[in-house]
């Protein structure tokens, strides 16, 4: 019974594992031994085959999963507008809707074609390099080019051709898959200051814009000037998610937000218009502290680090660099300079504001003085106003202005324009700046933290670099000016934050910052869809 029980219990095992033993009876022990040996060999081969088949199945499954993941990644970029509008509460949906990643160059081709048909010049007629634009087109004050840019009516063909040329470069790299590291990162420049810079303006706003444009070019970003806010929106519609940021006028950003539900005017993304610009991509340059951006002060960029002397400000400091522009101008040794002072005044109105006693210039320029000082300035005079003791060179392009400045022993401010780049240019050229103090604490007049000066960014510097003077102290001003004629600067002075390397760091950080994630912290709903429960950071 015992053997029978054992034999019966083995049969099911053999039946389930026929490769181990065959359940049929054997006639002799030798045949059994031979058969067992044969089946063991067969079992080993079958086991290896089963292992290979199992590994193949696992590989196929993993391959299928990889294909599904890759497909999901690429198809997410082509989400339909209807899906986006329906998923307004899904914060990950918006960006993927803008341009299908399969052939993005088709949209660039369309825009390139549209802009080319509206432009009267060939793209090659305008240099694409900012350095060439700044120092080739606008150098000669007496040239026909200058008269075209400065004296005639505004012509947008020049800006259009810069944009067309850059779009063509982007198109070429997309078609050939040869884009450089940052080339597919697009920044659309839709404000007046960028247009002014390209047309040769020497205003502080234009110089700041030119520095940002140059930094973006040097970092390899695709910087696209737009002739108008409408064109900026058109470029965005065409380029889509290649666009990292869109720089627009501060009032326009606020208007876009407030009128996001307007049936006829819309530029910010909403469920009804998901292809418009997300609010967190809109950046507004402001020359002074303050902001009208619905997401708060961080979305307004400024040329100076206002937070360093006005703690209540929270704008994003992008700034600018004067290094490349000023070092192109040869440094003039002190012994080769005349006793001359340059007056910072691009408008005659600055003289008439009377922050500085105008008799200073006539008195110090008198030939009767032991060391008379010559005074020069550059203002556009449409009123035939003349200032005694001052020679007006009229409007100058930037390089000519810098050359004239480099021949001087001082630059004096009249109270306006505030926060001009010119004092930084002067210091770089070895020229000290006379900074008028316009407001102060009468009980503590030498407390610099309470000073309001023409340029608060330099008020903590000391002679021989900066001479701060109280606007009503004419005698001290005259004494300091005469002293400055013999008090030579050690050489060029470029503060660290004004160097090109620091500018590149700031601009790269500004462009690549995760503004979308930052914006999510500023609101309770997704602002790119114009939510009604939006909450600003500074709202009580």
Image: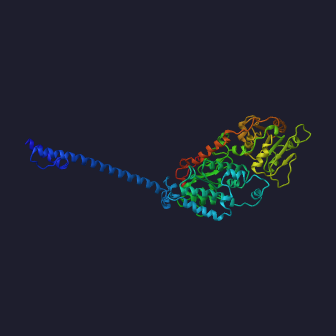
Would residue 491 be visible to someone looking at this image?
Answer: yes
Indicate the position of residue 57 as horizontal and vertical percent values.
32, 51
Residue 530 visible, this angle: no
Residue 310 located left or right of residue 173:
right
Q: Residue furthest bottom?
A: 117
| Outermost right residue | 368
Quadrant location of residue 362?
Answer: top right
Q: Residue at x 18, y 44 (%)?
A: 37
Q: Nearer the viewer, residue 86 or 119?
A: 119
Q: Where residue 199 sits in the image (x, y, percent)?
A: 71, 55
Measuring from the top left, give residue 481's x and y in whole percent: 82, 38
In terms of depth relative to the viewer, which is nearer, 149 or 231?
A: 149
- Horizontal relation, residue 291 to residue 20: left or right: right
Res 151 quadrant in image? bottom right
Here the colouring is rainbow
Q: Farthest left residue?
A: 1
Horizontally, is 345 left or right of 118 in the view? right
Q: Report x, y in % for residue 90.
A: 48, 54
Quadrant assignment for the N terminus: top left
How many numbered marks appear?
0
């Amino acid at each position: 019974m015992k053997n029978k029980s054992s034999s019966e219990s083995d049969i099911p095992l053999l039946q389930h594992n026929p490769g181990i033993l065959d359940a049929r009876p054997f006639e002799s022990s030798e045949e059994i031994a031979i058969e067992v040996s044969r089946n063991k060999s067969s079992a080993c081969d079958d086991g290896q085959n089963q292992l290979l088949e199992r590994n193949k199945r696992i590989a196929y499954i993993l391959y299928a999963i990889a294909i599904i993941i890759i497909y999901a990644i690429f198809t997410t970029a082509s989400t339909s507008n209807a899906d986006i509008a329906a998923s307004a509460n899904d914060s990950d949906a918006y960006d993927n809707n803008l341009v299908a990643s399969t052939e993005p160059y088709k949209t660039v081709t369309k825009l390139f074609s549209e802009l080319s048909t509206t432009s009267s010049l060939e793209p090659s007629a305008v240099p694409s390099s900012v350095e060439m634009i700044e120092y080739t087109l606008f150098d000669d004050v007496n040239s026909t080019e200058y008269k075209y840019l400065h004296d005639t009516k505004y012509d947008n063909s020049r800006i259009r051709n810069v944009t067309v040329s850059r779009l063509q470069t982007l198109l070429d790299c997309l078609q050939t898959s040869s884009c450089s590291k940052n080339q597919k990162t697009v920044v659309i420049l839709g404000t007046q200051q960028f247009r002014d810079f390209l047309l040769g303006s020497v205003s502080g706003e234009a110089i700041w814009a030119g520095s940002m444009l140059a930094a973006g070019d040097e970092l390899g970003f695709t910087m696209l000037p737009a002739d108008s806010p409408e064109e900026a929106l058109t470029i965005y519609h065409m380029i889509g998610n290649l666009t990292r940021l869109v720089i627009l006028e501060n009032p326009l950003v606020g208007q876009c937000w407030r009128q996001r539900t307007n049936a006829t005017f819309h530029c910010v993304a909403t469920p009804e218009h998901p292809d418009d610009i997300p609010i967190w991509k809109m950046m507004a340059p402001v020359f002074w502290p303050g902001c009208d951006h619905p997401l708060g002060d961080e979305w307004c960029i400024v040329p100076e680090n206002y937070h360093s002397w006005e703690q209540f400000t929270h704008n994003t400091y992008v700034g600018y660099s004067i290094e490349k522009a000023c070092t192109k101008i040869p440094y003039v040794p002190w012994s080769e300079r005349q006793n001359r002072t340059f007056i910072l005044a691009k408008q005659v109105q600055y003289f008439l504001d009377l922050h500085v006693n105008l008799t200073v210039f006539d008195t110090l320029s008198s030939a009767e003085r032991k060391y008379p000082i010559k005074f020069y300035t550059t203002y556009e005079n449409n009123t035939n106003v003349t200032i005694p003791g001052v020679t007006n060179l009229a409007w100058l392009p930037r390089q000519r202005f810098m050359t004239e400045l480099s021949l001087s022993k001082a630059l004096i401010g009249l109270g306006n324009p505030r926060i001009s780049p010119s004092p930084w240019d002067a210091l770089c050229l070895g020229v000290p700046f006379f900074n008028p103090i316009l407001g102060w604490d009468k009980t503590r007049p030498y407390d610099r933290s309470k000073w309001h000066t023409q340029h608060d960014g330099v008020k903590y510097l000391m002679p021989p670099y900066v001479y701060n003077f109280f606007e009503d102290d004419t005698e001290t001003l005259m004494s300091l000016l005469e002293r400055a004629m013999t008090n030579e600067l050690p050489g060029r002075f470029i503060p660290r934050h004004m160097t090109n390397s620091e500018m590149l760091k700031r601009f790269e950080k500004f462009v690549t910052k995760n503004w979308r994630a930052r914006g999510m912290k500023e609101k309770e709903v997704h602002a790119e869809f114009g939510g009604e429960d939006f909450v600003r950071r500074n709202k009580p």
